[in-house]
Every structure is written in C-alpha cells, then in structure tokens.
Image (cartoon, grey):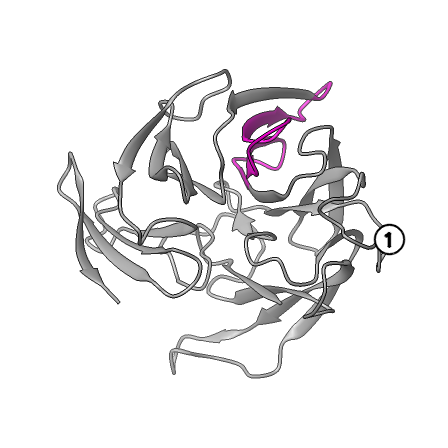
Amino acid sequence: MKRFAFVSCAVAICVVVAGPVRAAFTGGNLVILTTASGTGDAASALTLNEFSYNSATGTFGTTPTAHSITGLTLDGTNDHEGLLHLSTNGSYLVFGGYQAAVNTPSLIASASPRAIGVVDSNWNLTTTTISDYTGLALRSVVSTDGKHFWTGGNQGGDGGQYYIDASGALTQTLLTSGDARGNRINDGQLWGFSSTTSGSLVGAGLPTSAVSQTSAMNSPFVKSDVVFLDLDHNGTSETAYSTDGKNLLGKWHFDGTTWTQTGSW
C-alpha cells in the first residue's frame, strides 16, 4: 500500500502542487509513504521512499532513498489512511498513525493509541499521542508548523475533525463531528473531503473551535481528496483536481467566488 507526497510544496496525494519550499527538504523530490504489507488489516511497518527529481529532464529517479519510520504503524490495506502532507511552513511531513506493534490484528478496531507523526528534514520522527478516534480511523493530518494540527477521520464516537495544539500542554478541540477522509489547508483555509460532504470549507480560515462546514465542491468526484494548483502564479489557487478515492477524477476551476467542475474522468 502506498501513499504519496511531493515535498517541493504543499503536499499532494498522487498529484504535484506548486509552491515554494522554505526548509531543508530537497525541492521537487517525491516522497511515497509505503506499508510493508499490502494485504490484511494488521499493523504494518512504514517507510518513506524519496525519489529525486531531475529538473533538466523533468523526471524522477527510479531508485528511491528509503527512510524507515519506527514508532508508528498503519493498516496494511486501508485506502483512506496515511495521507501524507507537508506543513505549510515547508519544514515537516505529517500523517496520522497508530502506536501499535507490527502485526497487531484488526488495527483500526483495536484500542491502540492514535498519534500524529511529524517527520523533519533529517527524517527523524516525533509523535503526538491523541485520545480521539478510538476504534476509528485517523485518516489525515495537516499542519502549519509541526505543532498545530487539524485532523480528519471517521465520524461517530470521538471521531470527526479536530484541532490539536501541541505547542504546550496538549489540547484537542472537536471542530465538527462529520466524517472526513482527507483534509487540506489551501490559501489559509481548512478543507474537508468525504463521501457525505464532498469538498467543504471547515469554518473560516484555520478554526480552533467548533464550526460548521460549507459545501464548496459537491459531486461524486469529490469524496477523498483534492489537490489545489495556482497555475497563473497570482498567489491564489484557481485550478483543482479531485478524486473519489476509487476510480473517478474531477477537474475544477475557481472564478474568485465559486468552484465549478470543468472536467471528469
């Protein structure tokens, strides 16, 4: 099972997003988060595979540098977990995982602690244990600086979307109890994506208290994730590509007020 991130910019899942790098990650390189097991629902070991980018040829190398991640595991096959994101300050890769030994059975349903993984540019992992998502999947984590996080996961129980402040004494604040597969920070706004809410603005800006969601991309093509692009380089994303996580892709355009779907595959 593989999860993708481009460390040249705001993190993408399978798709490049434009933007500057402000840290020691090598700009343009591709990072793929892989689980050792591609079968079963038991806990699997993790590796970050870094593929170098050749700007002269516009291609990636075929042999990655493998960075083993110890301290967190993921379900071997779940296709809505392990979404890998670059913090908006460009300094950290972040994702959600489980503090469980490799081969722990039925990982998502287990009582294994959920944790946020933060990887610095030297490929060192630090973790922040959280008490939410018990028996549920912690699917996605985004961050501004490796200390302030917004998480998305299964709804029900203590699931949904949370704001996590780990800059001092840990605080966890429920933003919305709605289901979330992916989430992103785009142009300073928190987004959430799921099969029930499609693409939604979660509050205004980067909320730190309970909010409501406002649908902004509503179609079957927006159920798992969206990658935003600023192709005209004016500082605001005007193009986006979405996925339902299975077999549908959508293209979108923002006219300054509304996101409109302009293509599908």
Q: How many marks?
A: 1
Q: Residue at the location (31% across, 62% down)?
A: 249
| Residue 232 sits above or below residue 177 on the image | below
Q: Is residue 150 left or right of residue 233?
A: right
Q: Position of residue 234 (x, y in %)?
A: 21, 45
What amino acid is found at the position of numbered circle 1 in the picture? Ala
Q: Is residue 187 visible?
A: no
User: Above or below — where is 64 with respect to 254?
Assistant: below
Q: Nearer the viewer, residue 127 or 132?
A: 132
* Quadrant in the picture for residue 168: top right
Point out the image quarter for the N terminus.
Answer: bottom right
Give the image location of residue 255, x and y in percent: 13, 42
Quadrant for the C terminus, please.
bottom left
Residue position for label 1: 101
Q: Is residue 157 magenta?
A: yes
Q: Is 12 left, or right, of 139 in this rendering?
A: left
Is 29 positioned to the left or the right of 166 in the image? left
Q: Secondary structure at mark 1?
A: loop
- Residue 185 versus residue 55 in the image, above or below: above
In-image side of 225 versus 208 (left or right): left
Q: In the image, is residue 40 part of the stretch drawn in magenta? A: no
Q: Which residues are magenta?
A: 141-170
Q: Is residue 154 visible?
A: yes
Residue at point 61%, 37% (across, down): 146
- Furthest toward the left, the residue is 255
Residue at x 81%, y 41% (from the top left corner): 112
Is residue 189 placed above or below 14 in the rendered structure? above
Residue 136 picture quarter: top right
Residue at 64% over, 69% down: 49
